[in-house]
């Protein structure tokens, strides 16, 4: 499939998101990846005929932390190597700089919201991220305690503990259950400031967030808002 990294190309934006997650392979100077767009899987190949500044300037909405990480990396790569630099070299260096095995990452514990019922989720917003509902209960039924990306395409997202204060805003999109997760030592992950992306995680704990928990969170939100506005 031919990719044009135009500023407003939805296909180019979807490819850029997947590149930003580090979820691609490179062999013989050819980059191969898969994306989910319009609920269909597409196979993509890239080479050095693609102009790196066009990749950097291609819009990908909604913006994700990994895309911001990728943009910052490409900016620096272009500054160091010129605008006619090699895309394949850039992608190789990006993976080397940002993909790490679980045993190499200092923070081992992360958190993930999820839902046991796909019908309870905001599927419209999730589709913009290429997020598909996964039946984690079925995955955990074998007793191994591992959740994973069944399509092995986008990977799974998890958040740092610092983001737990913001989860009240995410329940419609991601669900009202919370996993406590541990990194697997031999699995690769891409970490940004607030989140981590990987193929699989070990589940340490699973809990349903109570209504009282959410009411208290909302109450505290409005208390803090009033303080800011001096109401």
Image: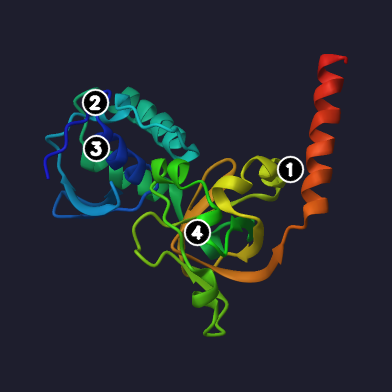
Measure how far apart labels 3 and 2 are at the Cα level. Answer: 13 Å
* Sequence order check, earlier mark of 1 and 2: 2
The label nearer to you, 3 versus 2, is 3
Q: Specify whether 170 is left or right of 162.
A: left
Q: Which quadrant of the figure contains the N terminus? A: top left
Q: Which quadrant of the figure contains the C terminus? A: top right
Q: Is residue 106 visible?
A: no
Pointer 3: what residue? 11
Q: How many discs mark residues in the rendered view?
A: 4
Pointer 2: what residue? 54
Question: Do the CB atoms of the residues marked 1 and 2 lie less than 8 Å apart?
Answer: no
Q: Is residue 121 above or below residue 199?
A: above
Question: Do the CB atoms of the residues marked 3 and 2 lie less than 8 Å apart?
Answer: no
Percent from the top left, x then y, of residue 94? 36, 43
* Sequence order check, earlier mark of 1 and 3: 3
Question: Do the CB atoms of the residues marked 1 and 3 lie less than 8 Å apart?
Answer: no
* Sequence order check, earlier mark of 3 and 2: 3
Query: What secondary structure is found at the residue carrying circle 3?
Result: helix
The label nearer to you, 4 versus 3, is 4
Measure how far apart labels 4 and 2 are at the Cα level. Answer: 36 Å
Query: What secondary structure is found at the residue carrying circle 1?
Result: helix
């Amino acid at each position: 499939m031919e990719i044009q990294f135009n500023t407003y190309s939805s296909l180019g934006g979807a490819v850029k998101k997947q590149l930003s997650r580090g979820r691609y392979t490179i062999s013989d100077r050819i980059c191969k990846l898969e994306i989910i767009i319009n609920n269909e899987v597409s196979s993509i190949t890239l080479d050095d005929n693609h102009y790196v500044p066009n990749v950097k300037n291609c819009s990908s909405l909604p913006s994700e932390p990994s895309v911001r990480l990728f943009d910052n990396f490409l900016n620096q790569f272009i500054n160091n190597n010129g605008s006619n630099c090699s895309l394949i070299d850039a992608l190789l260096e990006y993976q080397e700089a940002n993909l790490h095995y679980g045993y190499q990452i200092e923070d081992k514990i992360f958190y993930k919201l999820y839902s046991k019922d796909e019908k309870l989720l905001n599927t419209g917003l999730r589709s913009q991220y290429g997020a598909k509902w996964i039946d984690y209960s079925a995955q955990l039924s074998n007793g191994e305690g591992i959740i994973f990306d069944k399509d092995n395409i986008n990977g799974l997202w998890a958040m740092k503990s610092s983001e737990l204060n913001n989860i009240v805003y995410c329940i419609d999109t991601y669900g009202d259950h919370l996993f406590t997760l541990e990194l697997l030592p031999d699995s690769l992950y891409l970490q940004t400031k607030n989140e981590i992306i990987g193929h699989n995680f070990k589940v340490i704990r699973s809990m349903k967030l109570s209504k009282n928990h959410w009411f208290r969170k909302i109450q505290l939100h409005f208390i803090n808002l009033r303080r800011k506005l001096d109401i």
